[in-house]
Image (cartoon, rainbow, N blue to C red):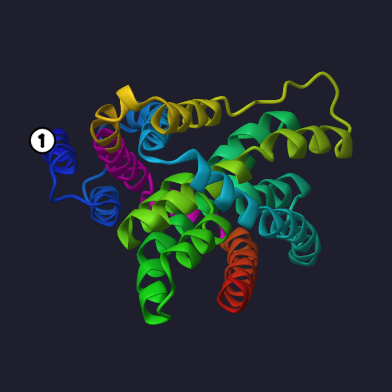
C-alpha cells in the first residue's frame, strides 16, 4: 500500500496540475502518515535531480539579464552571508549548542541550505548526528518558506524583481527558492535562480575558511560544479539562436524535475526527523531566518 500511494503521488507530480508547493505538501502528507517506502532511493536522487533541474532552467534565461541581477544582488549577498555567520556564532553560544552544529546551521542559512551543509560538513569532519540536526532544521524551515513567501509577496505588492531577490537571500535551499519564485512569476524565477546560484559559489571560500578556522588539515573542498552547467546552458540560450527551440522543452522538464525534488524532500521529513532535531537548533535556525528575512525584506522594499 505504501508503494502504491507513493507511486500515485509521484506520477501526479509529473502532471501539469502539480506545483512545487503541492508536491511538497504531498510529500509531507506521505511522511507524516504511512511513511516513505523508498527513503534511501529518494535521498540519493534528490541532490542529482535538483542539480539537473537547475541546469535545465538555464536554458530559459538570458545572460545579460542574469548579469544585471547578479550585480544587484552582490552587496546583499556579501552582507547577509557574513552577518548571518556572525549572528549564528553569538546566538549559538548563548544557546549552548555545539560549535559544529552552530556553524552548519549558520552556513545553511547564509548560503544555500542543504547543499552548503553537505559541502561544509566533511570539511568540519562533522558527525552524522550533527549533520542530521542541521539538515533537519534547514529543511523544516524551507518547507515553511515555500508556503509563506508568495502570499507575503502579494500582500506587500512586491515586484517580480523584488520578490526574486528576497527569495534568493532569505530562503535557505535552492529547491525552495526556485519553487517559491516560480509560483510568483517568470521574472522572479530568473532573478531568484541567478542570485541564489551566485550565492552558492560562496561554498568554496567559506569551506576554505572553515578548514582554517577549525584547524582541519587534509580536507577536500566540495565545489558545486552544477552551477557551471547552469551558466553554460544560459550562454547557449543567449548566444546560439539555433538552440532557442530547445529552451522551452528544457525549462519545462526542469520545472517538472524541481516539483519531483520537492516531493522527495517532503517525503523525507517524517515526524521522527522533525522531533529528533530538538528545540535549541530550531530556535537558532528560526532566529537567524527571521533576522535575515525581515532585514533583507526591509532593505529591498526601500531600495530596489
Q: Nearer the viewer, residue 304 or 221?
A: 304
Magenta residues? 252-278
Whether residue 185 is in magenta: the answer is no
Quadrant (top left/top right/bottom left/bottom right) for the N terminus: top left
Residue found 57% across the figure and 45% down from its top: 67
What secondary structure do most residues of the magenta stretch adopt?
helix
Depicted 233 relative to depicted 181: above or below: above
Quadrant (top left/top right/bottom left/bottom right) for the C terminus: bottom right
10 Å crowding of disc 1: few (<14), some (14-19), many (20+): few
Depicted 98 relative to depicted 207: above or below: below
Depicted 286 relative to depicted 101: above or below: below
The percent position of residue 162, horizontal first and vertical second, equals 50, 67
In the drawing, does residue 137 fall left or right of residue 155? right
- The residue singled out by tag 1 in the image is 4
Q: Quadrant of residue 8?
A: top left
In the drawing, does residue 93 fall left or right of residue 55? right
The percent position of residue 2, horizontal first and vertical second, equals 16, 38
Amino acid at each position: 500500500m505504501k508503494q502504491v500511494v507513493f507511486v500515485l503521488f509521484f506520477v501526479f507530480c509529473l502532471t501539469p496540475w502539480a506545483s512545487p508547493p503541492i508536491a511538497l505538501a504531498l510529500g509531507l502528507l506521505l511522511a507524516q502518515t504511512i511513511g516513505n517506502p523508498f527513503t534511501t532511493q529518494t535521498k540519493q536522487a534528490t541532490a542529482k535531480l535538483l542539480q539537473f533541474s537547475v541546469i535545465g532552467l538555464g536554458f530559459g534565461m538570458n545572460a545579460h539579464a542574469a548579469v544585471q541581477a547578479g550585480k544587484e544582488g552582490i552587496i546583499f549577498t556579501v552582507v547577509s552571508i557574513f552577518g548571518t555567520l556572525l549572528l549564528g556564532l553569538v546566538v549559538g553560544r548563548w544557546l549552548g549548542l555545539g560549535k559544529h552544529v552552530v556553524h552548519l546551521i549558520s552556513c545553511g542559512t547564509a548560503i544555500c541550505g542543504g547543499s552548503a551543509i553537505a559541502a561544509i560538513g566533511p570539511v568540519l569532519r562533522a558527525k552524522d548526528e550533527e549533520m542530521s540536526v542541521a539538515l533537519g532544521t534547514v529543511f523544516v524551515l524551507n518547507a515553511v518558506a515555500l508556503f509563506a513567501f508568495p502570499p507575503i509577496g502579494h500582500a506587500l505588492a512586491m515586484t517580480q524583481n523584488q520578490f526574486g531577490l528576497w527569495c534568493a537571500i532569505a530562503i535557505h535551499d535552492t529547491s525552495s527558492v526556485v519553487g517559491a519564485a516560480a509560483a510568483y512569476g517568470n521574472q522572479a524565477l530568473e532573478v531568484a535562480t541567478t542570485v541564489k546560484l551566485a550565492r552558492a559559489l560562496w561554498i568554496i571560500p567559506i569551506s576554505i575558511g572553515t578548514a582554517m578556522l577549525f584547524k582541519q588539515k587534509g580536507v577536500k573542498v566540495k565545489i558545486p560544479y552544477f552551477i557551471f552547467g547552469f551558466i553554460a546552458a544560459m550562454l547557449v540560450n543567449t548566444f546560439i539562436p539555433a538552440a532557442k527551440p530547445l529552451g522551452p522543452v528544457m525549462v519545462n522538464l526542469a520545472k517538472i524535475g524541481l516539483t519531483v525534488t520537492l516531493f522527495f524532500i517532503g517525503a523525507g521529513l517524517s515526524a521522527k526527523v522533525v522531533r529528533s532535531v530538538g528545540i535549541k537548533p530550531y530556535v537558532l535556525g528560526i532566529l537567524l531566518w527571521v533576522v535575515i528575512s525581515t532585514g533583507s525584506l526591509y532593505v529591498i522594499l526601500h531600495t530596489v
